[in-house]
């Protein structure tokens, strides 16, 4: 009898499950019909994601089916959801930590006023930053490299100020980018050809580059087709929206400046650094800024300097500067480069190229030179809000004069999956060659699941992608494609700094503290991946602050993928439901018993003026 009773109960549970599944299918059918009605432009994307996460796809991942009786879900349904209003339209391009009015209250010495200065808690905005009226999705890559919709960045000042330099031109309802720059008005391609005649760009030896004072990032844009990934930065200054233009074009860039604070990148990160008439005083303050470039430049890496004062004898009259000043400026640069043990490998026309030595042994006696101050600190990657020091970082030790300090990297793309030297040498605590391989395999599995949930992931729909807690960069490695790029963020509060490993894999990234706003304009990312971010920041800052920042930097119709503990994601789901985001919670790939879940979200399309003034802040 007991057996029969259990069988009856099983049939009852099966019937109940069937009813729930049918009910959910009906719900999503009705939701789909509503979305097809054309209520909002953003619903077209939300509809596709909804279709891809319905009960017809991977039923084993359907969270609601397995957890319909969850107390956390019941609490979510019964509790009141806070609705976030739109900010006033004047905040359309709000950059909290680079606010122009706040910047003017700081000293101008060493560009301090152009550095990050974030608002105190009482000045933070708790509203949704609107897109400008008429905003549309950017053109797909590679068309986006050359064209940007005017409505997305409605600023014409650069078309006038830089007209003869071919930065940007206004044509009808779009901006066109001919590929020119201050130092290369005939186009970035020809300029890069000149550099490539000296630096081995074509063979994958040079993969990561740093562009200081990037303008609209045409140098980085045209390097992409040569499989070189440039991290470009420029301040938010009188050149209105230059970094915003770069990101609208689909080119990696951040708001930044060489000032008094160390750059937010690890030591030995870049294969090449570049300055094209970037107006940085390289020879001033005993080579303060050249020493910072030396810190982030990989042993054997290249520094490219074009424009004043290079070849001053031929150009001083065109530059309208006294030849004595230019001569002294170049003399200082040459002197500092020699002290840094950089070898000058080329000077032709207005382009000079130096190469950093591969180790200390190839530069005998540098540490004994009284003119060079060697840094004392043991961690050159500790950079967040740390003042630049007038010293030179030590090379890692080597066993022979031929060995590359820190380890030699394979050409790209082999370096993407090869064991990074920092891992192989035991430089990163807690990671071994074996655990690195396991991490690579694990994220390949995760990304496979993501593409089942959101089939737009590898179609080119998402160009600018951010990983908020990148770890070893294996998410970015798993989705690596010419169609996209990933900004790998390593939180400053992470127990272990892994950003150096990410660069050794031929990827790019940055240090950041998510209790503060990111150094970018609104609406600059198409997809944001947040793995364990909210567990990491528990009791550090408010979840609300992080989610509002995600909303600020995510494009309308952009998507977010959260991976975290279920209790955390239920809280996230509640908050973003008041931010005009559509969400779907699904189970872990390994089944419903795993406490880690996946939350997929899509930001709705809306623009400034969509709501009445009483709903604005």
Image (spheres, helix red, strand yellow):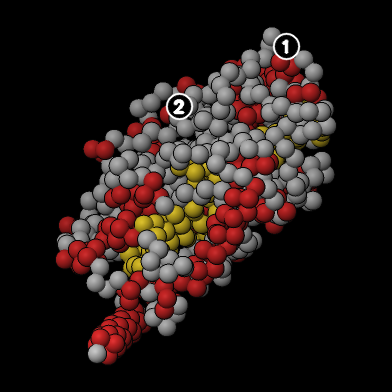
Mark 2 packing: few (<14 Cα in 10 Å), some, or many (20+)? some
Q: Which of 103 and 294 is in front in this view?
A: 294
Classify residue 70 as left or right of residue 473: left
**Does residue 213 appear anywhere in the picture?**
no
Q: Residue 368 carries which label?
A: 1
Tell me if 129 is positioned left or right of 294 in this view: left
In what element is the residue under mark 2?
Answer: helix
Position of residue 586 relative to residue 426, above or below, is: below
**Distance between the Cα atoms at labels 2 and 1?**
33 Å
- Residue sitting at 36 percent across and 49 percent down? 535
Furthest residue to the top? 370
Camera-side residue of 498 and 16? 16
Quadrant position of residue 523: bottom left
Q: Is residue 425 above or below residue 324?
A: below
* Count of residue discs: 2
Answer with the quarter of the image where residue 3 lies.
Answer: bottom left
Position in image of residue 550 (x %, y %): 38, 53
Residue assigned mark 2:
112
Q: Where is residue 218 in the image (x, y as percent from the top left)?
A: 63, 49
């Amino acid at each position: 009898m007991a057996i029969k009773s259990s069988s009856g109960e099983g049939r009852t549970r099966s019937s109940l499950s069937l009813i729930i599944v049918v009910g959910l299918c009906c719900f999503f059918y009705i939701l789909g019909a509503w979305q097809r009605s054309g209520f909002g432009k953003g619903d077209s994307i939300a509809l596709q994601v909804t279709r891809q996460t319905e009960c017809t796809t991977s039923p084993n991942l359907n969270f609601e089916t397995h957890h319909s009786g969850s107390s956390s879900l019941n609490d979510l349904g019964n509790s009141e959801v806070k609705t976030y209003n739109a900010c006033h339209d004047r905040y359309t391009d709000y950059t909290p930590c680079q606010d122009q009015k706040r910047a003017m209250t700081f000293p101008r010495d060493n560009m301090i006023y152009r550095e990050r200065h974030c608002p105190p808690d009482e000045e933070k905005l708790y509203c949704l930053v609107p897109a400008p009226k008429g905003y549309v999705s950017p053109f797909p890559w590679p068309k986006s490299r050359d064209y940007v919709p005017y409505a997305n960045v409605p600023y014409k000042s650069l078309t006038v100020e830089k007209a003869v330099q071919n930065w940007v031109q206004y044509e009808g309802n779009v901006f066109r980018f001919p590929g020119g720059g201050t130092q290369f008005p005939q186009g970035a391609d020809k300029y890069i050809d000149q550099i490539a005649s000296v630096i081995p760009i074509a063979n994958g030896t040079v993969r990561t580059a740093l562009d200081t004072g990037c303008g609209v990032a045409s140098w980085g844009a045209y390097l992409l087709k040569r499989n070189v990934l440039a991290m470009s930065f420029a301040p938010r200054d009188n050149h209105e929206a230059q970094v915003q233009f770069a990101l609208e074009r689909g080119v990696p860039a951040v708001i930044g400046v060489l000032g008094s604070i160390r750059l937010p990148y690890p030591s030995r990160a870049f294969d090449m650094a570049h300055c094209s008439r970037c107006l940085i005083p390289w020879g001033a303050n005993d080579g303060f800024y050249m020493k910072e470039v030396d810190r982030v430049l990989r042993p054997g890496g290249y520094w490219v300097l074009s424009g004043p004062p290079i070849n001053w004898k031929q150009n001083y009259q065109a530059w309208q500067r006294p030849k004595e000043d230019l001569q002294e400026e170049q003399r200082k640069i040459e002197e500092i480069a020699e002290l840094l043990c950089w070898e000058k490998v080329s000077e032709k026309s207005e382009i000079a190229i130096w190469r950093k030595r591969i180790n200390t042994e190839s530069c005998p006696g540098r540490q004994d030179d009284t003119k060079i101050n060697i840094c004392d600190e043991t961690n050159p990657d500790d950079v967040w809000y740390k003042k630049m020091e007038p010293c030179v970082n030590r090379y890692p030790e080597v066993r022979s004069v031929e060995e590359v300090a820190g380890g030699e990297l394979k050409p790209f793309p082999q370096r993407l999956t090869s064991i990074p030297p920092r891992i192989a040498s035991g430089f990163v605590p807690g990671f071994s060659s074996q655990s690195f391989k396991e991490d690579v395999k694990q994220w390949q599995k995760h990304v496979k699941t993501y593409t089942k949930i959101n089939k737009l992931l590898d179609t080119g729909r998402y160009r600018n992608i951010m990983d908020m807690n990148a770890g070893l960069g294996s998410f970015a490695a798993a989705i690596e494609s010419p169609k996209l790029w990933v900004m790998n963020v390593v939180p400053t509060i992470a127990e272990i700094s892994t950003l150096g490993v990410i660069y050794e894999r031929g990827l790019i990234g940055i240090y950041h503290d998510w209790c503060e706003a990111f150094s970018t304009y609104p609406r600059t990312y198409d997809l944001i991946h947040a793995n364990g971010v909210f567990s990491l920041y528990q009791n550090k800052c408010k979840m609300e602050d992080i989610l509002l920042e995600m909303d600020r930097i995510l494009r309308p119709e952009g998507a977010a993928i959260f991976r975290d503990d279920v209790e955390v994601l239920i809280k996230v789901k509640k908050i973003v439901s008041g931010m005009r985001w559509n969400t779907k919670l699904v189970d872990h790939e390994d089944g419903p018993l795993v406490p880690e879940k996946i939350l997929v979200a899509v930001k709705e399309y809306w623009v400034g003026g969509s709501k009445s003034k009483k709903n604005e802040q």
